[in-house]
Amino acid sequence: MVHTNQDTLEVTIDEALNNDDIKQVIESWEDQKEILRQEFRLFWGSNEMQFKMWWLLSGDDVRRAMVMTALEDQPEDAIDTSMSAFRGTLCPDISDLEALLADGGKKTVYLMEKANNSEENDPDVLKNKDEMMATFKESDLEKPMFAIDSMLSLRSLILLNFCNDIALVYAQQRNL
């Protein structure tokens, strides 16, 4: 029975990935990801040291408020609905508020550094990446790498959205 459910899931994924509407959504994720990365790099390039110092010196309540604001920011369009639905699965790193805030919020800064360097999907950041890739590659999907790349793209989009939200709140706090 489990095998039948797996087969059904693979057929459903294949059908979805061959659907033109889904392909357009994935292309839109890619476009938004690149825009968000450019915006974040502009912020990080001119504010990295000031942000890190301010973050370090800010109290736990300030960091908590900023992270919660970034996590609660969910725009209303279909792409962002997808982001919200998959955030816990694809981005467990931002799903645990306490982990983001532990030790002076070091994990939040770490994720921001990785996003700036386009390393948010590296195995040291995405702990289950190798397992995920192996599972998809061993499946009977027609295009396992397309499925993996789509999920990694959405993960990047979610993380970059989070990083940009933190940057926006920081800029508002600092009147930048």
Image (cartoon, rainbow, N blue to C red):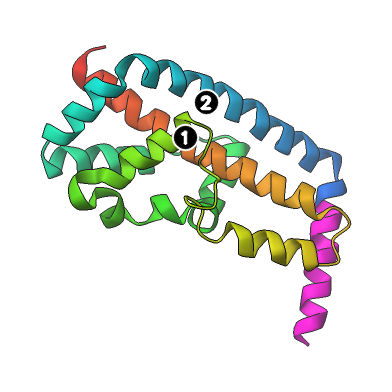
Tell me the quarter of the image containing the N terminus: bottom right
Q: Is residue 137 above or below residue 81?
A: below
Q: Residue 7: say if magenta.
A: yes
Span highlighted in magenta in the image: 1-16
Quarter-of-image position of residue 157: top right
How packed mark 2 is, by other alpha carbons closer than 10 Å (few <14, some 14-19, many 20 or more), is many
Image position, residue 154 (x, y; %):
61, 43
Q: Residue at x 20, y 17 (%)?
A: 174
Assess whether mark 2 and mark 1 are in contact (beta carbons under 8 angstroms).
yes
Residue closer to the observer: 80 or 106: 106
- Name the secondary structure under disc 2: helix
Please name the residue shown 84% across and 61% down the image.
Answer: 141
Q: Position of residue 8 (x, y in %)?
A: 82, 71
Frontmost residue, 23 versus 46? 46
The percent position of residue 30, horizontal first and vertical second, equals: 67, 31
Residue under label 1:
115
- The three-letter code of the residue at mark 1 reads Ala
Residue at which label 2 appears: 37
Q: Nearer the viewer, residue 62 or 80?
A: 62
The secondary structure that most of the magenta stretch takes on is helix
Tag 1, which secondary structure?
helix
Q: Is residue 157 left or right of residue 15?
A: left
Q: Residue at x 80, y 82 (%)?
A: 3
**Residue 174: assigned label:** none
Against 44, is 84 above or below?
A: below
Q: Is residue 79 left or right of residue 37?
A: right
Q: Residue at x 26, y 11 (%)?
A: 176
Quarter of the image where one finds residue 68: top left
Percent x, y for residue 74? 45, 39
Q: Is residue 85 magenta?
A: no
Amino acid under disc 2: Arg
Sooner in the amino-acid sequence: mark 1 or mark 2: 2
